[in-house]
Image (cartoon, helix red, strand yellow):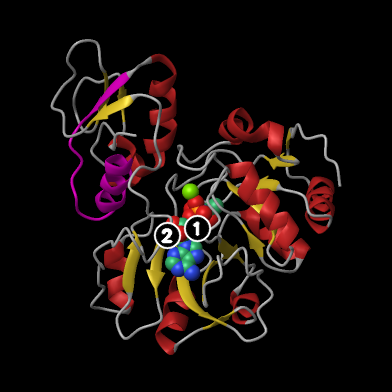
Amino acid sequence: MARAMNASIVSPTPARIADAVNLLRSGGLVAMPTETVYGLAANAADGEAVARLYAAKGRPSFNPLIAHVANLEMAKTQGVFSERALALANAFWPGPLTLVVDLAPDATVSELARAGLPSLAIRTPAHPVAQALLTAFGAPLVAPSANPSGQISPTTAQHVAADMADRIDLILDGGACSAGMESTIIDARGECPALLRPGSLDPADIERHWPNLTRPALDHTAPQSPGQLLRHYAPQARLRLNASGSIDGEAYLGFGDQAATLNLSPSGDLTEAAANLFAMLRALDKNHDRIAVAPIPTQGLGEAINDRLTRAAKPE
Ligand code: TXA
Ligand code: MG
């Protein structure tokens, strides 16, 4: 089907949610807000729609997608959950936790969306607009972050429009994402949970339910989470990390009580810093070639923030 794409930003009224469902049923691509970042949704069972999604992002097709479901019941039609995986889902869904589980025998998520893997990454988002869309659609939606592959994830509808409007069908506006950083990905298949991607759920919260979280060293020839590529989340500007101040006209992205071009959290709060990270990188990237970034503590959500900064700072 030929598509004249120039997606507009719409308010997520029931009528617009119904439009979005119709677009998805006919193979379209709809940007939806989640509590982490904006996702670009497609019908998980429709291989052609998924192929269009990979093309719109310029994403390598060896990098599988996360299936988004309305609830645990829908999740169980797609994945096999161990008792411990169930405990995590019960504790944190809906919310910013993605579980990698074995694929269920009758799963409908297309082979392309899984990049051919026998496992499935799956989560139930908490954002009311994502919930409304999934409930109305009634089946899983795959949704990578709604940005061109390798660039900064979007945390507002305007970010999505700036990057992707010419290649998608509709953008549902749910305001700024509250967490602002992608979900935490846990491989829940073995005896011990494995942290595949630090994200906006603190690993310490996971360990309260299932101790002995492992952090498998990333093997870049066969990464456990294929999206954990070295250069990712990257602005155009060059980043200099752990900088105590700016030199030679660099912009300074601060943290804590200090003078800065922009400050991730003047009070030194890591949750606030995570929520601001991508939007502030985008804002500085508009007017600066070089950005110096303050040191960020490594505990709690600082692990995810440092992960994103390290990938964003890798030279091309
Ligand atoms: O917060 C989020 O997770 C957002 C929102 C939109 O839900 N989505 C998101 O999707 O960040 P994406 O596509 O940008 O990142 C998905 C990550 C990739 O690193 C991918 O390699 C990994 O999930 N992944 C997907 N399926 C996997 C699997 N079966 N095993 C291991 N990693 C997997
Ligand atoms: Mg992404």
Q: Secondary structure at mark 1?
A: loop
Q: Is residue 36 visible?
A: no
Residue 120, horizontal then vertical, whole percent: 53, 72
Quarter the C terminus occupies? top left
Q: Residue at x 40, y 78 (%)?
A: 188
Residue 280, horizontal then vertical, whole percent: 39, 29
Mark 2 or mark 1: name the one nearer the start of the chain: 1
Nearer-the-camera pick, 168 or 22? 168
What is the three-letter code of the residue carrying label 2? Pro
**Image vertical order of residue 275 relative to residue 101, above or below:** above
Q: Secondary structure at mark 2?
A: loop
In magenta segment, residue 297? yes
Residue 69, horizontal then vertical, whole percent: 62, 67
Q: Which residues are magenta?
A: 290-311
Q: Is residue 255 left or right of residue 23?
A: left
Q: Is residue 138 left or right of residue 182?
A: right
Q: Ligand 1 within 8 A of label 1's CB?
A: yes
**Image vertical order of residue 142 relative to residue 306, above or below:** below
Q: Is residue 62 left or right of residue 205?
A: right
Disc on res. 226: 2
**Image vertical order of residue 201 relative to residue 189, above or below:** above
In magenta segment, residue 303? yes
Residue 95, horizontal then vertical, whole percent: 49, 62
For disc 1, the marked residue is 63
Nearer-the-camera pick, 1 or 188? 1
Q: Is residue 110 left or right of residue 311?
A: right
Q: Ligand 1 within 8 A of label 2's CB?
A: yes
Please report contact status of discs 2 and 1: CB closer than 8 Å, yes or no: yes
Q: Residue at x 15, y 22 (%)?
A: 245
- Other-residue count near label 1 (Cα within 10 Å), few / some / many at <14 / 14–19 / ≥20: some
Q: Give the Cα separation between the discs numbered 2 and 1.
A: 5 Å
